[in-house]
Image: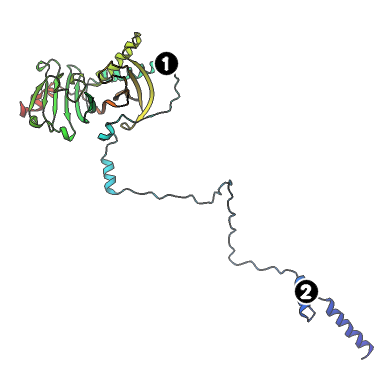
Amino acid sequence: MSLRSSAIFTGILLASIALPGCSQTKQSRRSASRHRPAVATRPPQNPQPPQTPPIKVGEERPALVATEVTPLTMPSAKAAVAQEKKSPQTITTSEVNQPSVVTPVKSTEPTGPEWNLAQAKRVTARAVEFAQKHPKYTCRVTRQERVRGRLQPREVMVMNLRQEPRSVHFRWLNDENEGRQCVWVDGQREGQLIVLGGRGDFIFRGRRMTLDPNGIMARGRSRYSITESGMDIMIGRLQEKIDALDQGNETLGRVEYVGPASIKEWPNPLQQVNHLIPPGVEPGFDHGGVRKYYCDLETGQVVLVEAVDSGGKLVEYFRIDRFVENPTLSDEDFNPDQIWPETS
C-alpha cells in the first residue's frame, strides 16, 4: 500500500470513531442514543381538556362544579285532593286536648313593667273596640272545657250572636252532637234556654226542651252559661282585670303582655296577653293558673282564649274563626218557632 492510500484509510478510521452514529458496534449505538437530541412530537388531533386539579380541604369549590340537586317527590292525586280540602284552621281532637303550642316571634320592642302593662292595655282596648263595632255576627266556635275535674270532649258549633237584645243561637257541627241546637234571648220566654236535642241526646233527639240556662243540665259540659257567650264578654273579663290593676287591686291577678306569638291553630302571628290567675280565685284553679288571650294583629279581634292550671293541664279552650259580620240578624233568627217550626 502506498503512503497516500495509508493516510486516507487512517483518516476514515479516525472519523468513524469520533462521529456519533458512525460506529458499527452495539456499544457505540447505545452511547449515541444517550446523546441524541429529543425530537418534538406532533400534538394529537383531538387534544383532551386539562384535568381539574383535586380540591384540597379548606379550598373554595370552583364555580364550574355542578350543584347537587335533590329530586322532588310529588304527592299522589288522592293525597293532593285531601290536602286541598283540609282547612288551614282545622284541628283534631288530640290537638285540642293539649294546650296550644306557642312559638314566640322575635320582637325588638322595649321591655319593663310599666311598658308591659301599657301594651297589654293597648291590645285589650283594640279587642274591645272590635267587639263593639260588630254587634251582630256569625262565626264558628270550637270549645273544650274541664268541668268538675273532667276534660270534656271537643265541641264545634256555628254561633249567631246579637248584642241588643242579647240573643244567641248555637248549632252543633261535630258528628256526636249532630242536630243539636239551642236558642236564648234575654227577656224572652222567661229567660229560659230552648234546646233541640241531637245525636248523643238519646231519647231527646229531635225533641224540644226548655231548660234553666244556669242549671246543671244546660251546663253539663261548660263552665259558663249561654248568657255569657260572645267576644265582647270574653274580652270584657280581661278588661275587668286591667281596670282593677289601675285601681291598685291585684287580688284578681296580674296581666302581662307576652308579645307576638304564632300558634298552630292560626295562620298569622297574634298578640298574646296573659292573665295570671291567683290560687283559689276561680273554680278549677285551686293552685292558680294562667289564661292566655290571643288577638289578631291586624283587626284586633280576639280569636283564641285558653287557660291552664298550675300543672299545665288544659282547663278552657275557646277559639273563634270564620268570623262574618251579619247585620241582617233579626228576631226571626232567634225565634225557635221560626227556626224549628216542625217542633213547635
Q: Which residue is mark 2?
A: 31
Please identify the quarter of the rendering in which residue 300 is found.
top left
Residue 281 image point, x, y percent: 28, 15
Up/down of 117 relative to 106, above or below: above
Residue visible at 8% across and 29% down?
Answer: 204
Q: Secondary structure at mark 1?
A: helix
Distance, label 2 to label 1, CA atoms, is: 101 Å
Residue 113 image label? 1
| Snapshot colouring | rainbow
Which badge, 2 or 1, is on the more N-terminal residue?
2
Front residue of this view, candidates 238 and 97: 97
Hey, what amino acid is under mark 1?
Pro
Front residue of this view, candidates 61 and 212: 212
Residue 94 at least partly seen? yes
Residue 189 image point, x, y percent: 9, 17
Crowd around label 2: few <14 · some 14–19 · many ≥20 (10 Å): few
Hey, what amino acid is under mark 2?
Ser
Crowd around label 1: few <14 · some 14–19 · many ≥20 (10 Å): few
Instruction: Judge from the rendering whether residue 264 lies leftward or rightward of residue 215; answer left or right.
Output: right
Instruction: Judge from the rendering whether residue 61 lies leftward or rightward of residue 267; answer left or right.
Output: right
Q: Residue furthest bottom?
A: 1
Up/down of 208 relative to 8, above or below: above
Please identify the quarter of the rendering in which residue 137 is found.
top left
